[in-house]
Amino acid sequence: MSETVQDKVDFLVIANRLPVDRKIDDDGNVSWKSSPGGLVTALEPVMQRKGGAWIGWHGAPDEVVEPFHHDGYDIHPVPLSAQEVEEYYEGFSNATLWPLYHDCIVEPVFHREWWDAFQKVNKRFAEQAARQASEGATVWVQDYQLNLVPKYLRQMRPDLRIGFFLHIPFPPIELYSRLPWREELVEGLLGADLVGFQTPGAAANFQRLAKRRPGVTAARGRAHTPDGRTVVIRDFPISIDSRGFHELATSEKVKAEAIKLREDLGNPGTIIFGVDRLDYTKGLRQRIRAVGELFKEGKLDPHEVVFLQLATPSRERVEEYKILRDDINLLVGQINSKVGTIANRALVYRNESVPREVLAAMYQVADLMLVTPVRDGMNLVAKEYIACRSNDDSALVLSEFAGAARELKQAYMVNPYDIDGMKATIMKALTDSPKLKARKMRAMRRQVFDKTIDVWADSFLTELEGH
Ligand code: GDG
């Protein structure tokens, strides 16, 4: 396979971010390392097989980076100015679409300048793809930041096969209709041949909207457009590299890390664990309140039980995320001042990102995993926990509002808005018989090892290429 950047390729992925991070060593040499993540793991072999290219932003504003070849495929960095990062990414993507698509948990902000930037940047991504795609190539567009790319790309290159996958939920029509640019965004997705969602409910919401467009008919997962095309609308629940996670979690390095972690936590009898990006969709306020109350009421003994919550910093320049960070700090402080012991804290809160090995060790030591989003497209953390566990005496508490709830049916389900219900379910999950817990874990493990990330990628691409 060629080591230089190819002129045209048959397979392209377009995502807001590139799958690589820049590393600069002490002598100033620059290299690019694959950023570990489910999507990259799933798509790397596909691109190597097809000779593909990945189009995305490299992460530094106001900088043009030349295309380069990386690990068997081409990388085409798309430049963004600092103002575009603010308006297209932090603004329209993360303060308009993100809250709107997550059921308006916080008020979406609508700014016309952000919309202008969103269109401009989406056009730039589409132009880059149009230049790089060979005749009849397959292009796979990822996520809400690039909602308009399918339509732009179709206009530029009608010969292409275009797929789009939305990683987050798609809201009901009543909420979606607030968006001043609702027609344009639906048209944007209808430029694709295949539009994939995490759940059938999200696909149905989109189909209902598509049907409202003039000249469009839509039923049973197919929309027919006025220009004579058929757009397939379907769910493709995303997953993880289950075997990869399992191997990592059972490696000697991670086992040693787990022993150290348990010691650092004071060797408690029970460890309850949560890990999320610090995002208001993840139900952190409700979860911390519920566990805090259980400590205060004496149902959980702080000498015996530790609740470890890792919250990875995220979108720190967006207003709602600053508010959330302050709220959580306050809540954690209040709880620990009431129930922490001199020897240890009941609630160990870490607002940082940790290496994968450390995260795997945390999954390893967690007797109970709390995944309680108020809305989530899928939630990979729930699946990672299951994949990392070899010990059956563990339990997963899962929000019914995570896409993962459709697949991990044996989890202890909660409505995160119902604090009392969540407290009761946490106690049940801690005290149920080992036999029952083992049965649940085994059923979920089968699910997670059957439906892996490569099954997801293959089923999407098979559907797209058969279009
Ligand atoms: C979006 C959708 C959908 C977290 N902290 C650390 C760390 N992580 C990793 C986890 C997991 C990933 O980040 C988070 O994935 P989620 O699925 O839980 O959530 P989002 O980031 O909101 O993802 C979601 C997903 O897209 C895929 O389609 O499931 O619904 O919102 O992989 O392990 N990884 C490391 N250190 C950390 O501190 N190494």
Image (cartoon, rainbow, N blue to C red):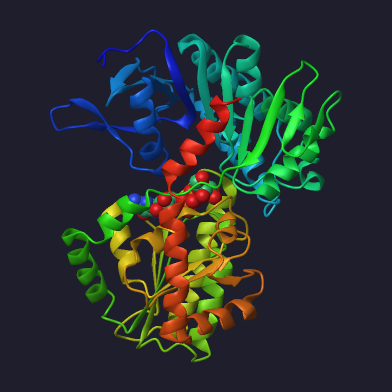
How many labels sit on residues? 0
Q: Position of residue 449 (x, y in %)?
A: 40, 55
Q: Residue drawn 68% across and 36% down? A: 233
* Residue most extreme to the left: 27
Q: Nearer the viewer, residue 21 or 462?
A: 462
Q: Nearer the viewer, residue 79 or 214?
A: 214
Q: Residue drawn 27% across and 27% down? A: 71
Choose top left, top right, bottom left or bottom right for residue 88.
Answer: top right
* Residue most extreme to the front: 466
Q: Is residue 247 left or right of residue 304?
A: left
Q: Position of residue 271 (x, y in %)?
A: 36, 76
Q: Is residue 312 visible?
A: no
Q: Is residue 78 left or right of residue 404?
A: left
Q: Position of residue 148 (x, y in %)?
A: 64, 25
Q: Is residue 121 left or right of residue 56?
A: right
247 to 86, vertically: above or below: below
Choose top left, top right, bottom left or bottom right for residue 122.
Answer: top right
Q: Residue drawn 44% across and 81% down? A: 337
Q: Nearer the viewer, residue 410 or 362?
A: 410
19 to 384, vertically: above or below: above
Q: Nearer the viewer, residue 155 or 423?
A: 155
Q: Is residue 194 visible?
A: yes
Quadrant, the C terminus: top right
* Residue most extreme to the bottom: 298
202 to 54, vertically: above or below: below
Q: Is residue 245 left or right of residue 322?
A: left
Q: Position of residue 296 (x, y in %)?
A: 51, 87
Quadrant, the N terminus: top left
